Amino acid sequence: MDFIAKLQEIEENFKELELKMGDSETANNPKEMESLARKHSKMAPIVEALAEYEAVIQGIADAKEMLTSEDKDFAELAKEELAMLEKQIPELEQHIQILLIPEDANDEKNVIIEIRAGAGGEEAALFAAVLYRMYAHFAERQNWKTEIISQNETGIGGFKEIVFSVYGMGAYSMLKFESGVHRVQRVPETESSGRVHTSTATVAVLPEAEAVDIDIRPEDLKIDTYRASGAGGQHVNMTDSAVRITHLPSGIVCTCQDERSQIKNRAKAMQLLRTKLYDAELQKQNEKMAADRKGQVGTGDRSERIRTYNFPQNRISDHRINLTLHKLEQILDGDMYELITFLTEADQAEKLKALSV
């Protein structure tokens, strides 16, 4: 009964929203119209699912009436119709419940991804580069844009650390389950005896913060400029283009030297700092819910070993949902859709379970 009442309330709100959108006063206010249009697009799938649900309920009532018909053939058809419609109810209810799961406020945001080499020396740095290419290729498939903020390369093509932005609608919703420790099992290129080595890299996926999300006081910042090193050519190394920003209250330090322009590096470093401070606030909130969310897909615990990439067996295993896929090459080439779908569905199942308690 509560389920139906909630849906009817949403339907009423949706009708009021449509009336407001049709109002001439609203039409002359682009900002309000944009806000209402966003709400409308979020509510529309629920209202459509409700209409389908109500049609099936009505169909069941009609079929039950027809069961009493004196015409035996007609009654038999009604019996078949009833069985078919009753079968649809659980699926429709589950679909609506999924639509009713509260949205993550960060789902539509861009992201900043940090990948750091863990245990395994040079091989771990090479694996960090493999992970970076996987996410970059996935972003290409989505027609998203990527931009490197900072990188610390090794001599043979690996990364001790790489930080980069991914710009695209819903980037966080699709990549948020990537945070954690990733483990690789393979024979390194430098290994002559053919032994399989195990190395790790950590991934942190942070929803990109906007200026309205976090307030930073200028007096809380220490900004240093210095001569950039590494890739970029002579021009980069001859000017103090690199920027280091220290947030004094938290001790968080953000650097950027990827651009030749000090102004651009400063803007990137500030964006990274804003995102890290926002993420620190989110982590505090997550800690409060940690006991309830222990064992769930979306805990966001970055010390948790989440996945193993086994090259000899062409296997990828996600330990959070006991998923094994024998398509390692395709996934590393950016074809992450099946993996993301399984993780999203597992997260939805956990949230539905929590809602029903």
Image: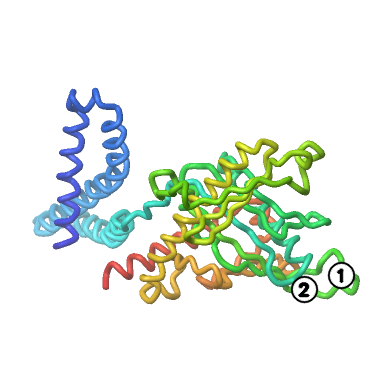
Which of 315/332 is in front? Answer: 332
Is residue 140 visible in this depiction of the protein?
A: no
Query: 55 left or right of 258?
Result: left
Q: Which residue is mark 2?
A: 197
Name of the residue lying farthest toward the front = 219
Point 33% across, 70% down: residue = 353
Total numbered labels: 2
Q: Amino acid at mark 2?
A: His
N-terminal-most mark, 2 or 1: 1
Name of the residue lying farthest toward the right = 192
Q: Answer above or below: position of 52 versus 347.
A: above
Q: Quadrant of residue 192?
A: bottom right
Q: Quadrant of residue 84?
A: bottom left
Q: Quadrant of residue 336?
A: bottom right
Q: Amino acid at mark 1?
A: Glu
Q: Are marks 2 and 1 in contact (CB under 8 Å)?
A: yes
Q: Answer above or below: position of 246 versus 167.
A: below
Which of 74/223 is in front? Answer: 223
Point 67% across, 61% down: residue = 328
From the top left corner, tell me how far across and down residue 85 is, in percent. 25, 56
Query: 105 left or right of 276?
Result: left
Q: Which mark is residue 191?
A: 1
From the top left corner, tell me how far across and down residue 306 is, in percent. 57, 69
From the top left corner, tell me how far across and down residue 39 is, in percent. 28, 41
Which quadrant is home to the N terminus? bottom left
Is residue 310 visible in this depiction of the protein?
A: yes
Point 18% across, 25% down: residue = 25
Neighbours of disc 1 within 10 Å: few (<14), some (14-19), many (20+): few
